[in-house]
């Protein structure tokens, strides 16, 4: 079945360590997004990519980095510069720039915690 | 930027009851979506509805873009409807970016 796969489901980070969250989709979508959700809050956009080899900062990009080398994959790295990384991270995709206002579909998320 | 306000923040219903959730937004939008987040964190797209009315089973949604609000109706609620309902809007810049409201937490009691 087509969908978005995020891994791992749970991730623990030590102080000063970078960690990478995986997001893969087989929906043939051009656009992909990373969101952060804190307890009791809505989602906030970290980075988004409308096409391969291109991405833009969202509202809370500091301390995060991304790459988009393949259409299917949009990994997010949480760097040591992110001082409060504990959160629920959600990846989404949609059709892309030719059809920008289409439904976004989400993966099941990764819960990141600090050790 | 666009502000999105959802009401009520919390709602408790008895199974079988009906409810209306509201989403107000502060500027013109060309993208509005309703999502349901279940207790396990999974986010499901319910409606893509920048204007007009749509129905899907017991759920329906109406967006009045000129008055900058959207409503989500849940009829004959079931315990499986419990969770958080988010409204998200996109501005007219056509980037696909969404701005989420804070959500309405719904608890349906048996």
Image (spheres, rainbow, N blue to C red):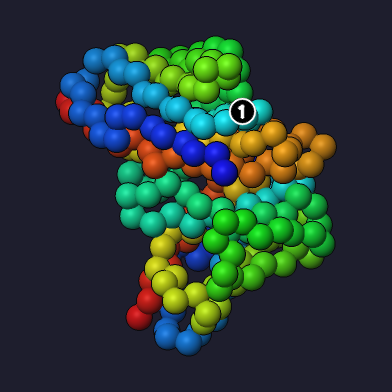
Tell me residue A105's x, y (percent). 59, 41
Tell me residue B95's x, y (percent). 72, 43
Residue at the spot x=47%, y=36% of the render? B4
- Camera-side residue of A81 and B77: A81
Q: Is residue A103 above or below residue A56?
A: above
Task: Quickly name the residue at label 1.
Answer: B28
Residue at the spot x=51%, y=82% of the render? A80
Q: Is residue B12 above or below residue B1?
A: above
- Camera-side residue of A49 and A27: A49
- Camera-side residue of B75 and A8: B75
Q: Is residue A40 above or below residue B58?
A: below
Can residue B80 be seen at all in this image of the molecule? no
Write down the quadrant of residue A111 in the picture.
bottom left
Residue at the spot x=29%, y=14% of the render? B18
Q: Chain of mark 1?
A: B
Quarter of the figure with the N terminus of chain A: top right
Q: Callout 1 environment at 10 Å: few (<14), some (14 to 19), or many (20+)?
A: some
Residue at the spot x=68%, y=51% of the render? A32
Q: Is residue B30 above or below residue A68?
A: above
Tell me residue B78's x, y (percent). 29, 23
SS under mark 1: loop
């Amino acid at each position: 079945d087509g969908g978005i796969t995020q891994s791992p489901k749970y991730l623990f980070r030590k102080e000063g360590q970078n960690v990478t969250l995986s997001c893969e989709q087989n929906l043939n979508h051009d656009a992909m997004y990373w969101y952060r959700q804190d307890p009791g809050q809505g989602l906030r956009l970290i980075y988004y990519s409308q096409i391969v080899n291109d991405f833009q900062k969202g509202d809370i990009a500091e301390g995060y980095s991304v790459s988009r080398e393949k259409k299917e994959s949009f990994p997010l790295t949480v760097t040591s510069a992110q001082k409060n990384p504990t959160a629920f991270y959600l990846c989404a995709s949609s059709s892309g720039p030719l059809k920008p206002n289409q439904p976004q579909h989400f993966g099941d998320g990764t819960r990141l915690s600090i050790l | 930027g666009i502000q999105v306000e959802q009401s009520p923040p919390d709602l408790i219903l008895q199974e079988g009851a009906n409810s209306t959730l509201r989403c107000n937004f502060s500027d013109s939008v060309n993208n509005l979506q309703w999502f349901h987040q279940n207790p396990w964190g999974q986010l499901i797209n319910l409606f893509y509805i920048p204007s007009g009315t749509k129905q899907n089973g017991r759920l329906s949604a109406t967006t009045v873009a000129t008055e900058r609000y959207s409503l989500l109706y849940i009829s004959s609620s079931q315990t499986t409807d419990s969770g958080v309902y988010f409204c998200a809007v996109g501005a007219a810049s056509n980037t696909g970016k969404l701005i989420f409201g804070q959500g309405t937490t719904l608890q349906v009691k048996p």
